[in-house]
Amino acid sequence: MINAKLAAQSHLNHQTIVKISKEVAFGGKELVIIGGPCTVESLEQMEIVAQKLSTASVHGLRGGVYKPRTSPYAFQGMGESGLEILARVRSHYNMPVVTEVMSISQIEVVAAHADMLQVGSRNMQNFDLLKALGQAGKPILLKRGLAATIEEFVMAAEYILSHGNPDVVLCERGIRSFDDYTRNVLDLGAVAALKQITHLPVIVDPSHAVGKRELVAPVARAAIACGADGLIIECHPEPEKSVSDARQALSLEDMVHLVASLKPVATAVGRSISDVGAGLEPAPIFCAA
């Protein structure tokens, strides 16, 4: 028994709905699809992404501006200039934005530009950060740690809840194992378990789970079939040229096709994927050379 007083499901129909915009909410019958690149590289890049995804059944944008990289010599993200790009694209295309926060000092500026703050796998047990996010005033996307148990994952969410923030979405993104054919081992059993243990929405990140673009679509469909409330997927205008995680990024066309393929799976399990924003194509943002 997990001693999570606030995260625990109290009865069968106890389900929290987490809204990140007027139209987009995790935890209801409607599934939420978030797409975008691993890293914000330029305004032009993000506009291309938003313009394409805003005409499909994709409900929000992802893009990293503070990047926790294994090597200190790897690209660490654009920082505040990247946040300004996200905010500009978000406003123009009316798509809520999810981006990662790595430290307490970043919370205020990220919250000013994004609709949802992501806690990455490496920071799942950064308890001081979790406590501070309890007072951030924005929904939190909490990713499972590289080797975290289900109990550790739930209790990390409990830190945020217990410090005043009820809007937490859990994200299964795979755990580390002995097999390196896939980047991680996607634990869909954990998704099913979390839906029974907690009242919090649970989504899946198939991109980081498998690490190979050709495997993303099958596991994305499996995630919806087993009860996930949504997906967060990496895609890029030119995947091979992505400055980070190029191997797992889908092309924008493949992303659109994947979302279309999810709809019959969603229907089969009593869920749906709305066309919020589909068909609306704002004039492009002017991108200076």
Image (spheres, grey):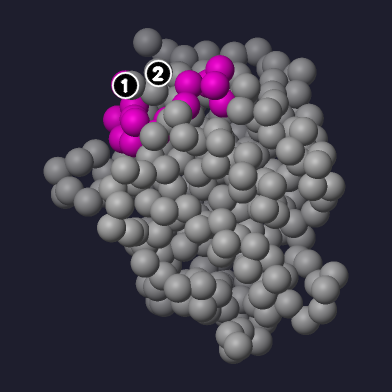
Find residue 208 and report its horizontal and vertical position in percent.
42, 45
Q: Considering depth in this image, is 238 or 247 the residue closer to the camera?
A: 247
**Other residues around mark 1 within 10 Å, as few (<14) / some (14–19) / many (≥20):** few
Q: CA distance from mark 2 to mark 1?
A: 6 Å
Name the residue: 77% across, 33% down.
264
Q: Considering depth in this image, is 112 or 227 the residue closer to the camera?
A: 227
**Quadrant containing the C terminus in the rendered view:** top left
Find residue 268 and report its horizontal and vertical position in percent.
81, 42
Name the residue: 20% across, 41% down.
74
Magenta region, residue range: 241-255
Residue type at tag 1: Lys
Residue type at tag 2: Glu
Name the residue: 39% across, 23% down.
239
| Label number found at residue 241 | 1
Q: Is residue 99 left or right of residue 220?
A: left
Q: Is residue 18 left or right of residue 217?
A: right
Q: Which residue is mark 2?
A: 238
Q: Is residue 14 left or right of residue 246?
A: right
Asked if one can make out residue 280 in the rendered structure from this viewpoint, the answer is yes
From this view, report whether residue 77 is shown above or below residue 28: above
Q: Residue furthest left?
A: 73
Q: Answer yes or no: do the residues labelled 2 and 1 have beta carbons within 8 Å?
A: yes
The quadrant holding residue 19 is bottom right
